[in-house]
Amino acid sequence: MTLRPVPNVTPLPSLVRSQARDKIKTIDELADIAAKARAAGRSVVLAHGVFDLVHLGHVRHLEAAAREGDILIVTCTADEHVNKGPDRPVFHDQIRAEMLAAMECIDWAGISFFPTAEQVIEIIKPDAYVKGQDYADSDEDVTGGIDLERQTVEAHGGKVVFTEDITFSSSSLINEHFARFDPEVQSYLDEKRNENLLDLALAAVDKIADLKVLVVGDAIIDEYQYTVPMGKSAKENIIASRFDGREVFAGGVVAAANHLSSFCKQVEVLTCLGRRDSYESLIRESLNENVSASFVYRRGVPTTRKCRFVDPGHMRKLFEVYHFDDTPLSGHSESEFCKLIEEQAPKYDVVIVTDFGHGLMTRKAIDKVTSKAKFLAVNAQSNSANHGFNLITKYKEADYISIDAPEARLATGDQFSDLGVLIEDDLRRHIDCRNFAVTHGENGSVVYEPGKGVSRVPAFTRQVVDTVGAGDAFLAITAPIIASGVPMEIAGFIGNAVGALKVGIVGHRQSVGKVPLVKFLTALLK
């Protein structure tokens, strides 16, 4: 066999690399550079974006931007604020900034650690802010960011300029040329891309904007105690740990409602709090702007609090302590809760029940919500406190059921059958329900609807930070989508995207919002 000679490639001189890195400055340094330039009578141009995969469209755009003034400053979004879903950006912010700085037309580059561009504009105060032609129609900008950016630019006497030249999509190029997913997932996305699933999914998300949703279920305080293991105690057979911090979140029904807040115009929570350690102030402060809440109270018990002790190094949960009373709601509290359901449920387009099996959803409460809801979506969770005693089969009818694979197997008493078979042959016999979704972690989800049968949707992330609340987020967003008449496979696709976003969030630090979801769906299928 004849070996081909290796071409004589001259390595990039370290001086060139150094010059590119020397052009990268902090935002404050860029502001100082811009101020001095303006004082010297020179005009400053700013361009901002992710620039995950720099291509010819970017080059032409930035060359056009440079012609709008004397100094061109380009900033890229830091990794933690790139809302294109898990596994993005492909290139870290330092690499993206250096790539930009290496371009001759760019005078200075930087990394923005702000979530949006307005803060960068406010600090640098450019004479011209340059965007691509695809942002010229603000109605097409799902984030609404271009209008805010324009206002900020014009407030400082600047102007917004839209360039016109050849365009490409970084997401499309990454999807086409980078193996981000396993072959099975990539094949699914390629197939659905050809079936116009992106437009169908985006239309489904927009379709629920005017719906009113009532979320009924257990209020849970999710507490994370961060502890760093130090080693075995000298006198006991235990691991001594150092306290490293604490976070407390409003979880359960509150977290589910907050996920809905950017998708639907009105959301209300119905739940029960303990009179002792109620955490009511925290819960009310945690509610998003268009989420209201009505509470009943139980005497002598706390609001359910689940305290997880976590090694912060890799977000490993060490153990968990429950502070709760899970005896069934009774007496005046039960009557008051059922009365609230009777009064409120008929006013809403969709009623979602998040039943964690901690005593709130009694037989009377279930009968009341079943009879009064126009469209009822339910999850009955199996957890360490109720394993085997909170089965979905206690709901005899619903419009949509969403549970995970272990919950489906417990409910049917079937450990080994295919999940699709469980839905078609078992769950449908036990529950009068048309639409089912069974989530299955890294294996995605299995969905069912009459006439179309079983569909399987893969998972869309390999990066899992925290699984708490992922199933609730799936249920919350898919329920109104299914209620609006969207087919189950499209709803399952959207739900898996929601789950992929949620497992990248620690606890309930933030909700899954409409803008990040739309960006992720677009990044998957563009």
Image (spheres, grey):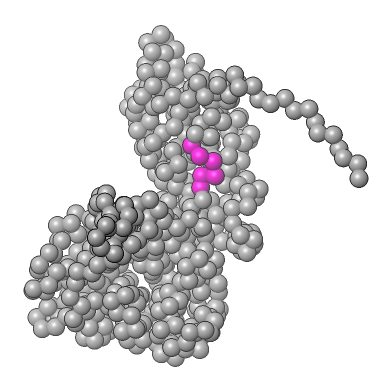
Q: Which corner quadrant of the image does residue 337 belong to? A: bottom left
Looking at the rendered image, the quarter that the N terminus falls into is top right
Count of residue discs = 0
**Residue 408 to residue 463: above or below:** below
Q: Is residue 520 left or right of residue 349?
A: right
Q: Is residue 429 left or right of residue 170?
A: left
Membership of 90 in magenta stretch? yes
Membership of 172 in magenta stretch? no
Along the viewing direction, whichever of 519 and 487 lies nearer the viewer: 519
**Residue 335 to residue 86: above or below:** below
Q: Residue furthest right?
A: 1
| Residue 133 visible | yes
Residue 270 position in % (x across, y down) = 21, 70
Q: Residue at x 48, y 55 (%)?
A: 463
Q: Residue at x 34, y 84 (%)?
A: 388
Magenta: main secondary structure: loop
Q: Residue at x 34, y 28 (%)?
A: 122
Q: Is residue 200 left or right of residue 509?
A: right
| Residue 153 visible | no
**Residue 347 to residue 229: above or below:** below
Along the viewing direction, whichever of 308 and 203 lies nearer the viewer: 308
Q: Which residues are magenta?
A: 88-93
Along the viewing direction, whichever of 493 and 24 lies nearer the viewer: 24
Residue 521 position in % (x across, y down) = 50, 55
Q: Residue furthest top?
A: 40
Residue 294 position in % (x across, y down) = 17, 67
Residue 40 position in % (x across, y down) = 41, 8
Q: Residue at x 23, y 56 (%)?
A: 248
Q: Residue furthest front?
A: 235
